[in-house]
Image: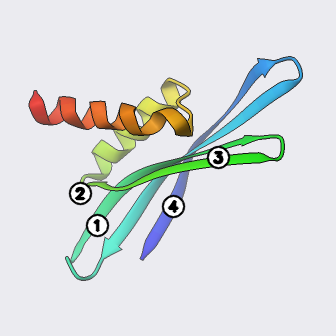
């Protein structure tokens, strides 16, 4: 079973006539075959009629780490296009330190 939980929203004013809405999600995926829960993150960007979504599932078994990643993404106004390298850097830093 898979669930997405909205963790936060931001509205960025790129210019007076251009606004970008960002939504940050925590993804919870219950894996019956592994008898475990995996967590991931997702960002949804809406700008007028255009929508962009990026998702990384199965990042970690730790809800706390996944929530830290979502918080990092929200704090720095990360958009979907920039999410993957930022999450990769975060995970690499945790593993290598």
Labels 2 and 4 touching (C-beta < 8 A): no
In primary-sequence order, the first of circles 1 and 4 is 4
Q: CA distance from mark 1 to mark 4?
A: 13 Å
Q: Secondary structure at mark 2?
A: loop
Q: CA distance from mark 2 to mark 1?
A: 6 Å
Residue 51 relative to residue 80: left or right: right
Q: Earlier in the sequence, mark 1 or mark 3?
A: 1
Task: Find the distance from the CA under tag 2 to the CA under tag 3.
Answer: 26 Å
Q: Residue at x 79, y 29 (%)?
A: 19
Residue 37: image tag:
1
The local secondary structure at tag 1 comes to strand
Which comes before the other along the chain, label 2 or label 3?
Answer: 3
On the rendered structure, is 69 left or right of 44? left
Q: Position of residue 70 (x, y in %)?
A: 44, 40
Specify few, some or many for label 1: CA neighbours under 10 Å numbering under 14, 14-19, or 20 or more: some
Marks 1 and 2: in contact by CB < 8 Å? Answer: yes
In the rendered image, which residue does mark 2 sit on?
Answer: 61
Q: Residue at x 89, y 23 (%)?
A: 17
Name the spot of residue 77 as percent of width and height, x first: 56, 27
Q: Which mark is residue 52?
A: 3
Q: Residue at x 30, y 37 (%)?
A: 88
Residue plotted at (31% across, 52% down): 63
Labelled disc at residue 4:
4
Q: Position of residue 25 (x, y in %)?
A: 52, 50
């Amino acid at each position: 079973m898979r669930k997405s939980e909205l963790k936060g929203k931001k509205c960025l004013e790129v210019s007076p006539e251009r606004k970008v809405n960002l939504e940050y999600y925590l993804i919870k995926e219950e894996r019956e075959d592994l008898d475990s829960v995996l967590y991931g993150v997702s960002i949804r960007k809406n700008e007028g009629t255009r929508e962009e979504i990026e998702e990384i599932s199965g990042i970690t078994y730790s809800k706390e780490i996944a929530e830290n990643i979502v918080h990092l993404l929200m704090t720095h106004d990360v958009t979907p296009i920039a999410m993957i390298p930022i999450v990769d850097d975060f995970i690499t830093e945790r593993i290598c330190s």
